[in-house]
Image (tube, rainbow, N blue to C red):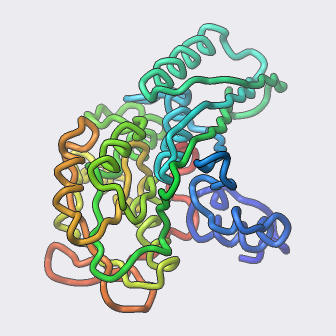
Amino acid sequence: MNTRQGHVVLAHGGGGQMTDDLLRQAVLPRLGNAVLGELLDSGILPSVGQDKLALTIDGYVVQPWRFPGGDIGRLAVCGTVNDLAVCGAVPMGLALGLIISEGFAVEEIETILDSIARAADEAGVKVVTGDTKVVNRGNDQDIFVSTAGVGRVATGRRVSPDLVQPGDKILINGAIGEHGLTVMLAREMPEVHSRLTSDVAPLNGLIEHLMHVVPDVVFMRDPTRAGLAGVAVDLAERSGWRVTLEESAIPVRPVAEHAAEMLGLDVLEVANEGKVVIVVRPREAEHALTALRGHPLGRDAAVIGEIADVADGMCELRTSIGGRRVVQKPYGEQLPRIC
């Protein structure tokens, strides 16, 4: 789709191919620079003293705003903290913006703010500035939350797809797909009773623990919109090497697998909010796995693939029945408003 001749649709916000198209056609030609062009989860700014600064921003429009395992407030804090952490940054402070529909209950605003406070405390970061706007009734969404975060990147620390080499191992800290499936069921099938809960969590503690054990982590990304598939395809395209995933090694809980089948979704493409995909050198894979499993948010960590010595920039899944298939990024958005 040529966005210059069309209009924005919900799928442009899904983190898939249509999002990439919009960035390349509309955003980067006008705002592109060396920092933005990296297209990382945070922009890494020039050095301040011995360290560098990382800056990130995100908007949250999830429907419903409260779901099993979390709400829009917890989601906003964790998502922003995680975008800093996967770039190797230690979060320093958050900015919070609220856009509230007229008529929204003050009691519910207080519930969201309490959740923000708890998540920030859990992540060890403070909300240091913010803004509030109220808009007219008539929207199908009662509240939007925007958060920006700044963090410190230690001298010499760099994680980037450009550093990936053949033989590197790919890890994840736990089971996939649970956030997107939880929100989808809560919104579209509220009558369905499920044991699914969102995995939303701040990952900075886990990541700092990992990098203390394995300082030279090569690459990290949280598989949010477009899920594990989106991260793996991006990694293949950016590095130029083939990314190979082992289906049988990817942690998926039966309840999530059943929900995905019921909804007709590929669990590889479903969003996560408490997971991180990690690439390490082969010699560090066992150390990294042990470090992850030693943290509460990494107990189900697994090695799920590797970087193959094939320079075609493709992502391949070795299926549990012995077949192979090419993994592609979702074109649009399977599950609108899951974050």
Relative image position of residue 169 (x, y in whole percent): 27, 70
- Viewed as shown, does residue 329 lie left or right of 206? right
Seen at 54% across and 22% down, the residue is 116
In-image side of 292 versus 143 (left or right): left
- Between 252 and 278, the one lying in front of the other is 278
Hey, which quadrant is residue 245 in on the image?
A: bottom left
Closest to the observer: 76 or 67?
Answer: 76
Tell me which corner region of the image, top left, top right, bottom left or bottom right, holds residue 219.
bottom left
On screen, residue 55 above or below 34? above
Residue nearest the observer in this picture, 255 or 286: 286
- Coordinates of residue 260 in the picture (x, y in percent): 32, 54
Q: Residue at x 75, y 24 (%)?
A: 101
321 sits left or right of 13 in the view: left
Q: At x 49% / y 61%, what residue is drawn? A: 158
**For residue 229, side relative to residue 150 (left or right):** left
Task: Give the x, y percent position of residue 188.
Answer: 47, 40
Residue 285 drawn above or below residue 53: below
Quarter in which the N terminus is drawn: bottom right
Could you tell me which residue is drawn at 80 percent across and 68 percent down? Answer: 26
Residue that protrudes farthest toward the top in the picture: 107
In which image quadrant can residue 242 be found? Answer: bottom left
Residue 16 picture location, percent across and down: 56, 65
Q: Quadrant of the C terminus?
A: top right
Count of numbered circles on the image: 0
